[in-house]
Image: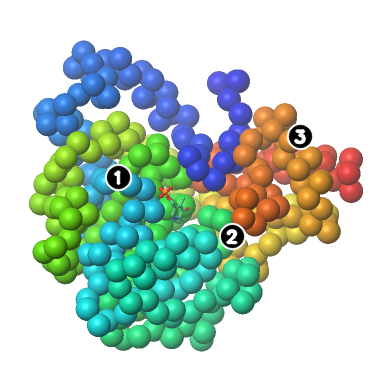
Amino acid sequence: MSDRIFNFSAGPAVMPEPVLERARDEMLNFQGSGMSVMEMSHRSPEFEGILARTERGLRQTMGIPDDYAVLFLQGGASLQFSMVPMNLYLLGRPIDVLHTGAWTEKAIEEIKKVAECRLAASTEAEKFRRLPRPDEIEFNPDASYVHICSNNTIFGTQWRSFPDTGEVPLVADMSSDILSRPVDVSKFGLIFAGAQKNIGPAGVTLVVMRKELAERAPASTPTMLKYATHIKNNSLYNTPPTFGIYMIGLVMDWIEAEGGVVAIEERNEAKAKLLYSAIDATEFYTGTVEKQDRSYMNVNFRIQGNNEELEKKFAKEAEAAGLSGLKGHRSVGGLRASIYNAMPLAGVQALVDFMHEFERKNG
Ligand SMILES: *Cc1c(COP(=O)(O)O)cnc(C)c1O
């Protein structure tokens, strides 16, 4: 489609074009049902089929073991900052957090409202320009669980491998890199992600959790905020975000058609390398994150001398050239290119070409 731009927005973000096309084709009449998925009862056999299909797709694509539940919730990743401690905190056993920036800051704030919080490591002193090194992390073997953010969308850092937390469940906020690479789900107690960055439209929150952890929640936990409620009712306790669930199913089909998450990772790596090489090839652009911790999803960079005027100009002219959403997060400034699964290599190439041209004119 010639009128589509390259969308580098951090989220809601670019969707795979074949997914949008299929949703369009099925929009008015889903597989002979005579109605749109949006119009269907969540209790209908058609929708139950969609839900089962999406769950199957996720289980296959992500390799989710049978003793894990797959839940489709609402409230965004932000509600998970509260729900996880409300359900998984064990009295007197502080929650360990690996503090790596804005998204763990928000998790910490919510944890503190219902539980005891302890920092297992923090890179705040370095302004989150890197992740904690293994020898800087001190886990408490008695923690209720460990909270980690796998990819910090705002600072542009990403854990290349995950620390071993032993018997203590590892809880990961994977909102901005879920299904961008293979992950051994069995190493995690719980994984959550807002769908709107890598796997679907806004409005659905995916939770993948070891079922037995849901038994920890106190009886006083509000029904809707209890994982056990949603496990027992297969995400159908109340009306779930039906259309979003359908779209995630289509995205899983797309990932499989592309060769699965292994092929997706290869492509993500190639895209990231292309962009980081362009940044490193000149003094005009500078990456803001230490090289070993650079994210393959959110690429943060600045223009010589942190020149805000020039950065503003860059974002504006890029937008006019069909490269949208490159302004950095308001809290950190600079420029940020979010290159999630659905961003094609051609989009990154177009950005790199634009960067060369912009440097030639302004450098
Ligand atoms: C976007 C994002 C969130 C917040 O997600 P909402 O769905 O808007 O609540 C949380 N964590 C990370 C890592 C994110 O990228």
Residue kind at label 3, given as amino acid type? Glu
Tag 2 secondary structure = loop
- As measured in the structure, the alpha-carbon distance from the residue carrying label 2 to the one carrying label 3 is 23 Å
| Vertical placement of residue 68 versus 4, above or below | below
Number of residue marks: 3
Dividing the picture into quadrants, the one containing residue 146 is bottom left
Q: Residue at x 19, y 36 (%)?
A: 239
350 with respect to 218 (left or right): right
In the foreground, 282 or 11: 11
Q: Residue at x 31, y 49 (%)?
A: 206
- Mark 2 lies on residue: 155
Residue kind at label 2, given as amino acid type? Phe
Residue 117 on image: x %, y % = 37, 76
Q: Residues within 10 Å of mark 1 (few under 14, many from 20)?
A: some
Q: Residue at x 65, y 43 (%)?
A: 326
Identify the mark at residue 317; answer none if there is no mark.
3
Residue 78 on image: x %, y % = 39, 53
Earlier-in-chain disc, 2 versus 3: 2
| Vertical placement of residue 264 versus 43, above or below | below
Tag 3 secondary structure = helix
Earlier-in-chain disc, 2 versus 1: 1
In the foreground, 128 or 269: 128
Q: How is the image coloured?
A: rainbow
- Mark 1 lies on residue: 74
In the foreground, 106 or 26: 106
